[in-house]
Amino acid sequence: MSKVKERAQRFKRLLADETFQEIIEFIKQEQIAVFLDSSATIEDIDKAREVVLGVDEVQRVIRAAIDDEAVENKKLS
């Protein structure tokens, strides 16, 4: 099995993991609460935005690895 396929399989398992999904959702909801909090400072909102962008980047990396596998499979067929 190629490194691309191995990585994609690991990332697919991670995406399917309920605990991982729960953590991702918890982090996002926690940050959304900051956006909605009228007492949040600009610094709080900036930090929340950075956290959301970080979580989005993690999800992008996971999707990219899975997409890489699809591309590799297409090339081999």
Image: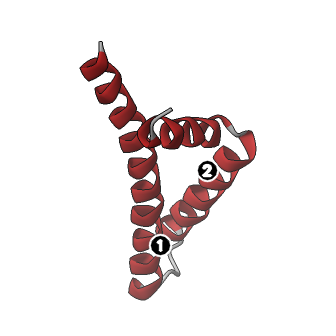
Can you say which quadrant of the picture contains the C terminus? top left
User: Which numbered marker is on residue 48?
Assistant: 1
Coordinates of residue 70 in the picture (x, y in percent): 35, 26
Count residues near mark 1 (Cα–Cα under 10 Å), then give few for <14, some for 14-19, many for 20+. many
Q: CA distance from mark 2 to mark 1?
A: 14 Å
Residue type at numbered disc 1: Ala
Residue occupied by mark 2: 25
Q: Is disc 1 placed on a helix, strand or loop?
A: helix
Q: Nearer the viewer, residue 8 or 63?
A: 8
Residue type at numbered disc 2: Glu
Coordinates of residue 63 in the picture (x, y in percent): 41, 40
User: In this rendering, would 75 be left or right of 8?
Assistant: left
Residue extending farthest front: 1
Q: Nearer the viewer, residue 7 or 17?
A: 7
Coordinates of residue 23 in the picture (x, y in percent): 67, 55
Q: Is disc 2 placed on a helix, strand or loop?
A: helix
User: In this rendering, would 32 be left or right of 66?
Assistant: right
Q: Nearer the viewer, residue 35 or 63?
A: 63
